[in-house]
Image: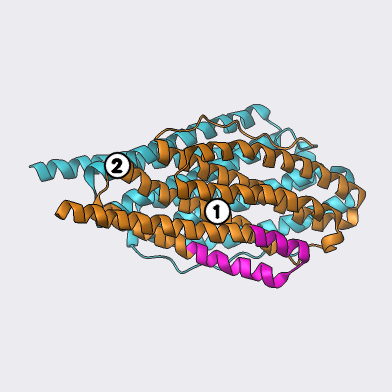
Chain colours: A cyan, B orange
Amino acid sequence: MVAEHTVKAFDEDITRLRGLVAEMGGLAELSVTEAMDALVNGNEELAASVITRDKRIDQLEAEVDRLAIRVLALRAPMADDLREVITALKIAGVIERIGDYAKNIAKRVGHIEGRKRFEPLTLLPAMNELAADMVHDVLTAFAARDPSAAAEIVQRDAKVDAFYDSVFRNFVSYMVENPATISSVAQLMFVARNIERIGDQATNIAEMVYYAATGLNLPEREDVPAPKV
Amino acid sequence: MVAEHTVKAFDEDITRLRGLVAEMGGLAELSVTEAMDALVNGNEELAASVITRDKRIDQLEAEVDRLAIRVLALRAPMADDLREVITALKIAGVIERIGDYAKNIAKRVGHIEGRKRFEPLTLLPAMNELAADMVHDVLTAFAARDPSAAAEIVQRDAKVDAFYDSVFRNFVSYMVENPATISSVAQLMFVARNIERIGDQATNIAEMVYYAATGLNLPEREDVPAPKV
């Protein structure tokens, strides 16, 4: 009976831990989408709410850390269960980074001229959607403990990287032709870079989901070269 | 005798774990310094060795993860000891990010025109030195478990951020006046941003060192605003 009680308590802890990670992930995904909406529409109120939400994501990460440490201390889980706790801890750290990137994008709102009619800005929503979809799908793969979905998401990162290279070249040409817009386009370059990093972090989570589900590592990805300009 | 044996084995594991983290940190610090040397001197061979070293840093992180999991599984440490293991795991993750930023800087070598005589490039070594010193000193604070040194390092991040804002404004002015150099200066903007992030990560480690040594969190830092240009 004691053993059964302990197993049940552990399962409850794990469910709570996974719930916190899913909550963090949902907030980060929302921030990725809303940060781009705020940028495209020059909506400073929406940008402010993305920035505020990042504090909540940070608090949730601290909660994941505390709970993981408590589970490790009280239940001393073994093998698969231990891997599950450590993976939740690590995924929470990566989601926190995604929240940071979204916050960084939101902070650019108010520093870009022209808004919707500003040509370089029109390139970014489609790139952001690729990255946001990766974040969405990797959270689904995490919830479903689905290693084949995770492996598929890793493949998509190359598309985001190719998009980034193309955007970077385009921005440089635009600045050369429109020197008056340089400071705005420079801000958008950082936005593009943040989106590219969101894709990277979704990929990192996918690798962790794969590992947690199978105990195996995916074959290493090729490094992305710096854009050739 | 059994208890004593267990304590000794745990101490050996912790020493090994801290040694791996220190080794990672030393490599990352070297990469931060060498990446800037490679950039300033257009030394592609040195840049390549920074890029190669990053793989070693990643391997060491995987080793830290494995050892931490083994210690948690075999020794089920409590309280301070558990905090120590989790902190080592988290610091290893942050050092891996610093290695990535240095690698990103190294990848820009070969994409910058003019080298030493290129005016925007001359702004970066002093900024990099501030960040590299933070990395060096936080590793010393980690090795010495020194919370007051850690708290001092957190204060220094504001200098790196102020440097970054000034560099960013300077780069934009330079691009406006020298449109032919836009693509090179855009590369250097990313370098400046990577240096700023290295300072942030050194600060994150300092906070973790403080927490591991005291069980307390440092008061939260103010967020850094986006550069006003």
**Residue type, numbered disc 1:** Arg
Q: Chain of mark 2?
A: A
| B134 is within the stretch colored magenta | no
The stretch in magenta equals: B33-58
Q: Is residue A158 left or right of residue B183?
A: left
Q: Judge the density around disc 1: few (<14), some (14-19), many (≥20) Cα neighbours within 10 Å.
A: some
In percent of the image, x 67 and y 34: which residue is there?
A: B225
> In front here: A20 or B117?
B117
Q: Is residue B100 left or right of residue A150?
A: right
In the image, residue A154 above or below residue A183: below
Find residue A222 and name its label. none
Q: Which mark is residue B97?
A: 1
**Tally of numbered tags:** 2
Above/below status of B141 relative to A59: below
Q: Is residue A177 above or below residue B58?
A: above
- Could you tell me which secondary element the residue under label 2 belongs to? helix
Find out whether residue B34 is within the magenta segment: yes
Residue at image location 63% in from the left, 39% down from the top: B156
Residue A150 visible to an observer of this rendering: no
Of the pair A51 and B47, the residue shown nearer to us: B47
Mark 2 vs mark 1: in front: 1
Q: Would you say the magenta stretch is mainly helix, strand or loop?
A: helix
Residue B41 location, quadrant: bottom right
Q: Residue at x 67, y 50 (%)?
A: B195
Q: Quick one: SS at disc 1?
A: helix
Residue, disc 2: A15
Which residue in the rendered view is the most extreme toward the right?
Answer: B177
Q: Residue furthest top?
A: A45
Where is the C terminus of chain B found, in terms of image quarters?
A: top right
Marks 2/1: CA distance?
Answer: 29 Å
Q: Mark 2 and 1 residues: CB-CB less than 8 Å, in contact?
A: no
